[in-house]
Image (cartoon, helix red, strand yellow):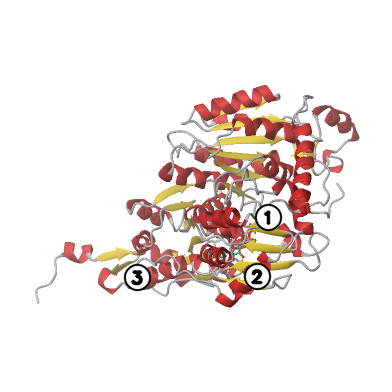
Amino acid sequence: MAPQSAERQEAECVSGAQLVAEALKLQNIEYMFGIVGVPVTEIAIEAQANGIKYVGMRNEQAASYAASAVGYLTGRPGVCLVVSGPGLVHALAGMANANMNCWPLIVIGGSSDRNQETMGAFQEFPQVEACRLYSKFSARPSSLEAIPAVVEKAVRNSIYGRPGACYIDIPGDFVNMQVNKSSVKYVDCCPAPPVSMAEELAVSKAASFIAHSKKPLLIIGKGAAYSRAENSIRKLVDQCGLPFLSTPMGKGVVPDNHPYCVAAARSRALQHADVIILLGARLNWILHFGLPPRFQPDVKIIQVDICAEELGNNVRPVAALLGDIKAVTEQLLDHLGKKLWKYPSNTEWWKELQAKIKSNEETSKALSLQKHLPMNYYMVFHHVREVLPKDCVLVSEGANTMDIGRTMLPNYHPRHRLDAGTFGTMGVGLGFAIAAAMVTKDYSPHQQVVCIEGDSAFGFSGMEVETICSYYRYNLPIIIIIVNNNGIYSGLDADNWKEMSKLGEPSSWVPPVSLLPNAHYEKVMSSFGGKGYFVQTPEELQAALRASLEEKHVPSLINVMIDPQSDRKKQDFHWLTRSNL
Ligand code: ADP
């Protein structure tokens, strides 16, 4: 046989970096977020060459948050690419957050060369082991040839069953090493997860409990949003006349302005319901563990989840429906449809809920219509709500900013609210907003992304403003609204500050909750080429928001000064009660 030409031999070779990028592309990965450096720069370059969009961020935490939000928004994981050691350690934040949220995510970490392992190599760290605690699957391919199979397995693990984070470790010496293409084990794109349905007996038991309930309640969680079950759930609500409420990120699966939404009577609805249908929400701290005093001691829970191990956590359900929410909701609809069952609209339960909705709405309205300055939270959200487009993607984080914003800013579409989530993570805002802006740019360019956060929350990832700004970077026209109370929970104003500064050394008296009074965060935005607004009145706020919405191609930051002591209205129950502040 004649020897092959040098070009032909070269054409048949492929580097580790190329293999990673090609395998990701084959698995329909569209977006990668990261920070390059030794040894992963070539992987980012190859990803771009293969048609994967790469966004270079300023901190791996924000990159990992962004990649995880892509997974939630598109159903296909985003990738976070990080360097060895500290780069990977920063990305653990996003892996933990994604896993807690049950969102798919792929993290790819470069690691030190194999022949330097245990020798104290540059940034050497037990990365595969470190990621195990934060992921469903954590592995290093045994060879270059095995890279596509490991990538496919990671993608499949991230979306099959309960979604979550997966880690792939790429040693530095793999990146530029070459291998003959013919020896590589290529694996086809993994299909969407197979759909699983609940046992028929369990479905008919559930339908019977629902049909006999006196005070039914449907709870819609972010698992329902992730599973794209909005049409079936909407049908269930309408066909059965069920009062429903959504968890923070379940909002919008059925629009918040639906007449059967009882969000404004949340505590009352949870406390008195006799039968609860739980669609893709865990009975964790967000739902007060499903226990008294927030729930009836004998409440009957009908639990729908894709994760068998979740069924029965904290409360034993009367019916455990293991399966995909969309498919199981169709099964329930079928059973209840056959019974021609609809919950009557004239019951005592409806009257009780409606009365509570009315009184709660009146309290919020009174607070939101106050005229005094500086503004309180309710005034801010009321005036934002009047101007905000109904279809914008809302990102929200902070303490009061997120909690009050959740009740004051309605969602009309599924997967249009991203927030601190199950892990209560602060600092996710800008990463999530960047992910949402990348996805909307490709799939629904008319939609705008609005990120509303507290001044403290903004600080965690503030430098990502540089990522979104200017034609030389990614030019993502995100609108950031900072609800600025000079601190965490509450702050000091400049006068208090002057008075207290007489006390001497700042570290012995500056309240741990306080941040700089009247900080001009809008200048961060203008310094990178976006628009910055400093607003103190409702009129200035609305004018700035209108101008930002009109300037569709320029990112903006509206810094809204509020009363540093502004607080939530009185609650029947606090979500978290540990602090006496
Ligand atoms: P929330 O924060 O809105 O209360 P959680 O994150 O606690 O929601 O719960 C989401 C639940 O949804 C998880 O238990 C997860 O296993 C489940 N889940 C995710 N995808 C699906 C699906 N396709 N079908 C059924 N359940 C799902």
Q: Which mark is residue 344?
A: 1
- Frontmost of labels 1 and 3 is 1
- Residue 118 is situated, as x and y percent measured from the top left of the image, at 54, 73
In this view, the residue in front, 383 or 21, is 383
Few, some or many residues within 10 Å of mark 3 (<14, 14–19, 20+): some
- Residue 200 is situated, as x and y percent measured from the top left of the image, at 55, 75
Secondary structure type for disc 3: loop
Choose top left, top right, bottom left or bottom right for residue 446.
Answer: top left
Is the residue 117 above or below the residue 37 in the image?
below
Q: Which mark is residue 187?
A: 3
Secondary structure type for disc 2: helix
Q: Residue at x 44, y 57 (%)?
A: 40
- Frontmost of labels 3 and 2 is 2
In this view, the residue in front, 273 or 46, is 273
- Residue 199 is situated, as x and y percent measured from the top left of the image, at 56, 76
Q: Earlier in the sequence, mark 2 or mark 1?
A: 2
Q: Which mark is residue 227?
A: none
Secondary structure type for disc 1: loop
In this view, the residue in front, 135 or 516, is 135
Q: Earlier in the sequence, mark 1 or mark 3?
A: 3
Few, some or many residues within 10 Å of mark 1 (<14, 14–19, 20+): few
Q: Cβ–Cβ below 8 Å for labels 1 and 3?
A: no
